[in-house]
Image: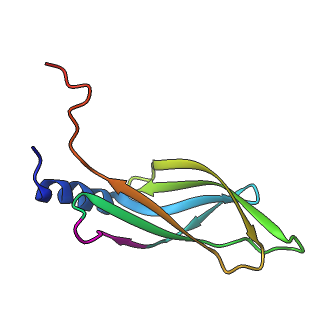
Amino acid sequence: MLTNAALESYARHTKRRLAYVRYKAAGVWRMAEIDRCEYPEGEPGKLNVWLVLEPPVSNGVDAVSIDGVQLIDTAGAVFLETEEAILMDARQEGVLYRISFEFKESLEGEVV
């Protein structure tokens, strides 16, 4: 059985691999920094990654759609990719977005 320390190690290693975020807003991929990462107290192996996704300059458009989010690793490769359908008011300062990783031991599919 993995210890809590081992699970925390997986979460910390993942954090070190993350470099920045890309998100698709109004059909264009944009880069942003990771706002913060946290390890929730009492939840070993969990990592929350917080992002602030800002709308592009509105040019008279009232709403902007965020259609996808990617976490990019330190080698420049896509680490995580997800499709989204977030509609935001173009006058908003941004959207606070959280991605959670939870590492745990599983015996499912174990080959004996």
Q: Is residue 39 magenta?
A: yes
Q: Give the vertical position of 55 relative to 81 (above or below).
A: below
Q: Residue at x 24, y 47 (%)?
A: 104
Give left or right: position of 74 versus 107: right
Q: Residue 8: image x %, image y %?
A: 19, 60
> Which region of the structure is painted magenta?
36-42
Q: Residue at x 65, y 73 (%)?
A: 54
| Front residue of 88 and 20 | 88
Q: Residue at x 39, y 53 (%)?
A: 75
Q: Give the vertical position of 60 relative to 102 (above or below).
A: below
Q: Quarter of the image for the N terminus: give it.
A: top left
Give left or right: position of 20 versus 82: left
Q: Give the vertical position of 25 relative to 38 (above or below).
A: above
| Front residue of 8 and 73 | 8
Q: Residue 41: image x %, image y %?
A: 25, 72
Q: Quarter of the image for the C terminus: give it.
A: top left
Q: Is residue 65 magenta?
A: no
Q: Which corner quadrant of the image does residue 95 belong to? A: bottom right
Q: Residue at x 71, y 79 (%)?
A: 92
